[in-house]
C-alpha cells in the first residue's frame, strides 16, 4: 500500500474517532425509546442514533487492547460489530442501560479478535486459557513479577490460584507471551548461516538407526523363514494364515478348508507355535536365559 493511502486511512480513522467522541450522550428515556423503535419496528434511524451515541465505548475499550500490537482501527471495527450485536439483542424493558449491556459484547468481540490475530499460533482455545491470556500480565505486574527471565515459581503459584488454572498452563502461557512469532526459515545469524528450523529435533530415527532397524527386520524375517521349515505342511499353512498374513483367517474357515474342527485347528496352531519357538531358540539362543527379557 502506498504511503499516501496509508496516511489517508489513518487520517480518516482519526476523524471518525473524534466525531464519535463528540456524539451527544443519550438520556435514559430517549435511549429506551430508540431501542424499542429499532427492535419493534426496525427503525434504522433509531439504530444509527443509538450506535453513534455509544461508539465512544468502543473507542475507550479499544484503547485498553492496544498493547497487544494490533491496529487501533481494527480493534474499533471489531468492537463496532460487538456493539451492533448488542443492539440486536438488547431488551429495553429490563431497565438496564444500553451501555452496561453493550460493554460485554464489545469486550468479547475485541478479545476474540485479539486471540485470532495476536499470533499465527492459536492461543486461548478454552475459557480458562482465554482468562489466563488476558489477565496474566496484569496479575504479574500486581505481584511485582515483571522480569524478562521467565515467571517465578511464587508468581506462577499465585496466578494459578487466582485464575483457578494449572501451574503448567501459567508457565506455558508466560513463555508463549514472552516472545513474538518467529519464522522457522529466519536466519540464525546476521551472516545467514543456517535457519531456525535446523535446530528442530527430528521426530523419526536417524539414518544410522533406520539402517539398523531395516537390517534387523530382514534378519528376523530370514530366521522365521528358516524356522518354518521345521514345521509340517499343515502346521506351516496354519501359521501363515493365522499369524503372517495381514488379515488373519478364522479358525472355522481353516477347519473347513482342512476338513477338521476349529478346535483341532487351535490345537495344531498352539503346537506349531511351540515348535517354532524352539526352532528359533536353537538358532539364536534363549533371550530369557541370556537376560534380554525380564
Image (cartoon, rainbow, N blue to C red):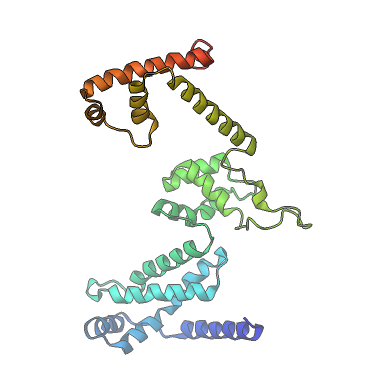
Q: Is residue 72 left or right of residue 29?
A: right
Write the residue at 40% across / 78% down. Answer: 54
Q: Nearer the viewer, residue 156 or 288?
A: 288
Q: Position of residue 91 (x, y in %)?
A: 25, 74
Q: Is residue 215 left or right of residue 293?
A: right
Q: Position of residue 179 (x, y in %)?
A: 61, 54
Q: Is residue 91 above or below residue 142?
A: below
Q: Nearer the viewer, residue 96 or 147?
A: 147
Write the residue at 20% across / 23% down. Answer: 261
Q: Is residue 129 left or right of residue 100?
A: right
Q: Quadrant of residue 249?
A: top left
Q: Is residue 210 above or below residue 125?
A: above
Q: Nearer the viewer, residue 162 or 245?
A: 245
Q: Nearer the viewer, residue 19 or 78?
A: 78
In the displayed orientation, state which residue is furthest to the bottom.
45
Q: Position of residue 87 (x, y in %)?
A: 32, 76
Q: Is residue 6 above or below residue 132?
A: below
Q: Position of residue 269 (x, y in %)?
A: 32, 21
Q: Is residue 281 left or right of residue 42?
A: right
Write the residue at 22% across / 23% down. Answer: 260
In the displayed orientation, state which residue is furthest to the right.
191
Whether residue 294 is visible, yes or no, is no
Picture quarter with the N terminus: bottom right
Write the residue at 60% across / 58% down. Answer: 181
In the displayed orientation, state which residue is furthest to the top.
289
Whether residue 258 is visible, yes or no, is yes
| Number of numbered markers | 0
Amino acid at each position: 500500500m502506498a504511503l499516501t493511502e496509508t496516511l489517508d486511512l489513518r487520517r480518516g480513522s482519526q476523524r471518525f474517532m473524534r466525531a464519535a467522541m463528540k456524539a451527544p450522550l443519550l438520556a435514559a428515556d430517549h435511549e429506551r425509546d430508540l431501542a424499542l423503535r429499532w427492535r419493534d419496528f426496525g427503525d434504522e434511524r433509531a439504530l444509527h442514533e443509538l450506535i453513534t451515541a455509544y461508539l465512544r465505548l468502543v473507542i475507550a475499550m479499544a484503547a485498553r487492547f492496544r498493547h497487544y500490537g494490533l491496529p487501533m482501527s481494527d480493534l474499533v471495527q471489531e468492537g463496532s460489530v460487538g456493539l451492533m450485536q448488542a443492539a440486536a439483542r438488547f431488551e429495553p424493558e429490563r431497565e438496564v442501560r444500553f451501555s452496561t449491556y453493550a460493554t460485554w459484547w464489545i469486550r468479547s468481540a475485541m478479545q476474540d479478535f485479539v486471540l485470532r490475530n495476536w499470533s499465527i499460533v492459536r492461543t486461548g482455545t478454552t475459557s480458562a486459557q482465554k482468562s489466563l491470556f488476558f489477565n496474566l500480565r496484569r496479575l504479574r505486574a500486581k505481584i511485582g513479577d515483571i522480569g524478562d527471565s521467565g515467571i517465578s515459581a511464587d508468581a506462577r503459584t499465585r496466578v494459578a490460584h487466582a485464575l483457578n488454572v494449572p501451574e503448567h498452563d501459567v508457565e506455558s502461557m508466560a513463555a508463549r507471551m514472552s516472545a513474538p512469532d518467529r519464522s522457522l526459515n529466519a536466519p540464525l545469524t546476521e551472516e545467514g548461516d543456517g535457519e531456525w528450523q535446523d535446530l528442530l529435533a527430528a521426530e523419526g530415527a536417524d539414518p544410522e538407526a533406520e539402517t539398523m532397524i531395516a537390517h534387523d527386520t530382514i534378519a528376523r524375517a530370514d530366521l522365521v523363514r528358516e524356522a518354518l521349515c521345521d514345521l509340517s505342511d499343515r502346521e506351516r499353512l496354519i501359521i501363515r494364515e493365522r499369524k503372517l498374513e495381514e488379515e488373519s483367517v478364522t479358525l472355522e474357515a481353516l477347519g473347513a478348508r482342512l476338513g477338521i474342527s476349529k478346535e483341532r485347528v487351535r490345537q495344531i496352531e498352539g503346537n506349531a507355535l511351540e515348535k517354532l519357538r524352539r526352532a528359533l531358540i536353537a538358532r539364536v539362543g534363549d533371550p530369557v536365559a541370556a537376560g534380554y527379557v525380564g
